[in-house]
Image: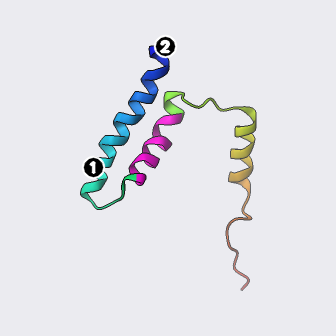
Amino acid sequence: MIEDLLPIGLLIVVARLLECLLDRIGLISIVAYTAAAILLVPVAGIVEPTRKLQFFWASASSSSSFLPTSTR
């Protein structure tokens, strides 16, 4: 049970530390929580990469349809 709660606790602590740090430079708290999630969720193993998620990452990174193209 404690093994399941440890990564979530770590995520909360790091997010709060980032919030204090980023608040000093004028950024809103959602930036800190988002950065902590992006940095720690894959490392802490909170979310296991499934086959569907890996397919989504591969298709999103290889697709350039979201980027505007110049027509010059």
Crowd class of label 1 (few under 14; some 14 to 19; many from 20; radius 10 Å): some
Queried whether the magenta region covers residue 35, the answer comes back as yes
Q: Residue at x 49, y 28 (%)?
A: 44
Q: Position of residue 39 (x, y in %)?
A: 46, 41
Q: Secondary structure at mark 1?
A: helix
Q: Give the answer, above or below, for where 40 lies relative to 7.
A: below
Task: Look at the numbered disc 2 and give the secondary structure of its residue.
Answer: loop
Question: Which residue does the image show at 54% across and 29% down from the upper left?
Answer: 46
Q: Residue at x 27, y 49 (%)?
A: 21
Residue holding disc 2: 1
Q: Residue at x 42, y 34 (%)?
A: 11
Disc on the earlier residue, 1 or 2: 2
**CA gap, disc 1 to disc 2?**
31 Å
> Residue pushed farthest bottom?
72
In the displayed structure image, the side of residue 34 where residue 17 appears, left or right:
left
Based on the displayed image, in which of its 4 quarters is residue 24 positioned? Answer: bottom left
Most common SS among magenta residues: helix
Q: Nearer the viewer, mark 1 or mark 2?
A: 2
Q: Which residues are magenta?
A: 30-41
Q: Position of residue 5 (x, y in %)?
A: 45, 22
Mark linked to residue 21: 1
Disc 1, disc 2: CB below 8 Å? no
